[in-house]
Each structure stands twice: as C-alpha cells, then as structure tokens.
Amino acid sequence: MIDTQTFTVSDFLKAFDAPASDAEMIAQEIEKYDFRYRRLNAKERAGVIEGVLGRMSGFTEVGAHRQGIWESCWTDASAAYEAGDGKASTLDPSFMGATPVLRLGSDYAKPQLPDFETHWFRIIRHWLFTRYLSEAKRVFEFGCGSGFNLDCLARMYPEKVLTGLDWSNAAVDLVDRIAADHGHKLHGEHFDFFDPNPDLELGTGSVAMTFAALEQTGKNFKTFAEWLLACKPDLVVSMEPVLEFYDAECEFDRLAIRYHNVRKYLNGYYSWLREQEKQNRVKILKAHRCRFGSLYHEGYSLLIWKPLV
Ligand SMILES: C[S@@+](CC[C@H](N)C(=O)[O-])C[C@H]1O[C@@H](n2cnc3c(N)ncnc32)[C@H](O)[C@@H]1O
C-alpha cells in the first residue's frame, strides 16, 4: 500500500530553490489547488518504464518543418477560446497535463487529479512573475503560443506593456483577441527564432521570456540567443528543458535524455550561456533544475540571465 502525499509549500520552495521568505506567497497560491499524489509501486513503475521505452521511436522531431503543425494547434486553441467564451483556462495548452504519470522530485508520481501539472505550473509562473518581473516595464514572450502566460501576467500587472511573439499567425491573432477582450496592454507580433526581426527593440526596462519555446529550435538556438543578447533586455527568463541538467549515470534521467534527444529538443543553450559568462558577455542569475515534468522529460527548468555587453 503506497501512501498519498501532498506537495507542500516547502516542497515548492525546494523545487524552485526559492528563499523561505517566499513561503507565504506560495502558500496563498497553493491553497487554490489539490497537490496530492502517490509514488508508483514496483510493478507500476516497471510498466511505466516499459511503456516509455516502447513509445520512444515513435516521437516526432521538433524543428523548422513544424510551423504548419503549430498553426493548426493554435487555430484549434482559438476555437476552444471562442467556444469557452474567453475563459482564461481555455487557453491552457493541451500538451500540459497530457500524461497521467509525472516526473516529480527524483522519481515518477501519480497525481490524484489530472490538472496537477497545470496547477503546479501556475504556482511556478506566479512565483517567477512576482520575483523576476515585478520591476519590468515591458515584457516580450517569444514563442508565446496561446498567450496564456501573457494573459496571466496582464492580470497580475495591468500597467505593463506586453508583446506576444510567435511564428504562428493563429497564435498572434489569438493574443490580439485576448488583449481586445480583456483590455490588456498586450499585442501579438509575428516572429521566427530562426530569422529574428532586426527592427524589434527591447532594451532598458524590458524582460524577454521563453516557456517551452526555445526547446523547439534544438541545436539551432544561437541565431536567437545572439540576437537577444544584442537587444540588451534587462533580463531573460527561460523555462525550458535543459539537457545538461540530467545525470547520465541515473536510469530515471537516461529516459529523459533519450526522449529529449529523439525529439531533438534544445541542445547546448546552458553550455552556451556558461561560455558567454566566461567571456563576461552575460551573467547567469539562476540555473536550476526544478525536477518536475511530464512522463517523458522535465520542461520546467530555469535559466535566468542578463546581458552584460
Ligand atoms: C510547446 S509550444 C509553447 C507555447 C507557450 N510558450 C506555452 O508555454 O504554452 C512552442 C511554441 O513555440 C512556437 N515556435 C516553434 N518554433 C518557432 C520559431 N521558429 N519561431 C517562433 N516561434 C516558434 C510554436 O508556434 C509554439 O507556440
């Protein structure tokens, strides 16, 4: 018999590597949700691993060829937003919370409720926005998808000027629609990581962020990263899967490494940042593995840095 546990305030503080002084803010947020889960028994765990290995060769690769897939994903999301009368939760991406078993801490976990992942993400997003974005005047989210992060940010800080950028026109239109519906200071703009707009200005007072978006560029992240560095935002907040954080000696991590490599997700961004730091081009403020993810990998790792040049 395996006991049900609850992911507590101190678990969240540890997962985010947050100071104890953030406990009250997190406590207020987690009150809204049910974070009960249980570990798997040995038979279930073996079955989960077998299932992951069995599906491994069937996963598609990310990259430049997938623009059409994202276009249809955000076209469907617009329809769901429309059908849901513009309710904020209709913007939650369908890939979040899609697996019934999660990576939590150093092992798999079965949440009591299917929304565990989405709600866990809401807690870290609230914490990140409060801790790192409160001073920003302008915020740019690159690869913003449905715009659900920007909608949340606009509700927390209505005075900030927000831009949602994506290579999908459906995503850009959806962001504009959300802004119009709710009176947010927000607009959408077309943007391609592989061919960044040279006329876009960020600069003093701005924060750039990516959530599970730069992952899509694989090894080809440098065009964007160099461009972003030259744009000199005050801060860059990236929540992405970070290959360098896994431990190849550990079986649990090796499964995530394999999945990450099969999908050709972001590869080398953290190493590149460390190289730039050695050359005094950036300062890395936070590089942290939160040890949370879907069944397959951990997409919620944090790299927070600022340009120095
Ligand atoms: C996994 S989704 C994440 C979306 C959103 N940030 C979120 O957390 O739900 C990846 C996003 O990156 C966008 N994307 C992928 N490749 C891109 C590229 N080359 N340029 C701009 N956006 C891109 C996709 O259209 C999609 O919106």
Image (cartoon, rainbow, N blue to C red):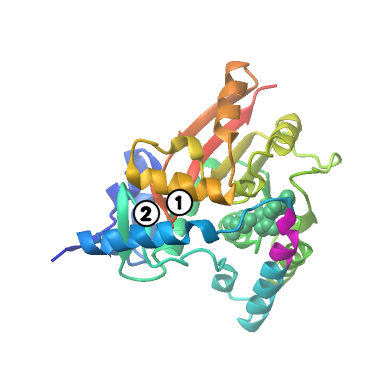
Q: Position of residue 276 (x, y in %)?
A: 62, 22
Q: Is residue 72 magenta?
A: no
Figure quadrant, ligand 1: bottom right
Above or below 22: residue 278: above
Q: Position of residue 225 (x, y in %)?
A: 69, 35
Location of residue 60 (image quadrant): bottom right
Q: Residue at x 76, y 62 (%)?
A: 172
Looking at the rendered structure, the kind of residue marked 2 is Arg
Q: Which mark is residue 103?
A: 2
Q: Which mark is residue 189?
A: none
Looking at the rendered structure, the kind of residue marked 1 is His
Disc 1 is placed on an element classified as loop
Q: Quadrant of the C terminus?
A: top right
Q: Which residues are magenta?
A: 65-71
- Which residue extends farthest top? 279
Please report contact status of discs 2 and 1: CB closer than 8 Å, yes or no: yes
Mark 2 → mark 1, Cα distance in angstroms: 7 Å
The residue that mark 1 highlights is 297
Q: Residue at x 81, y 43 (%)?
A: 195
Q: Is residue 69 magenta?
A: yes
Disc 2 is placed on an element classified as strand
Above or below 203: residue 87: below
Out of 109 and 165, give the one closest to the viewer.
Answer: 109
In the figure, is residue 111 to the left or right of 221?
Answer: left
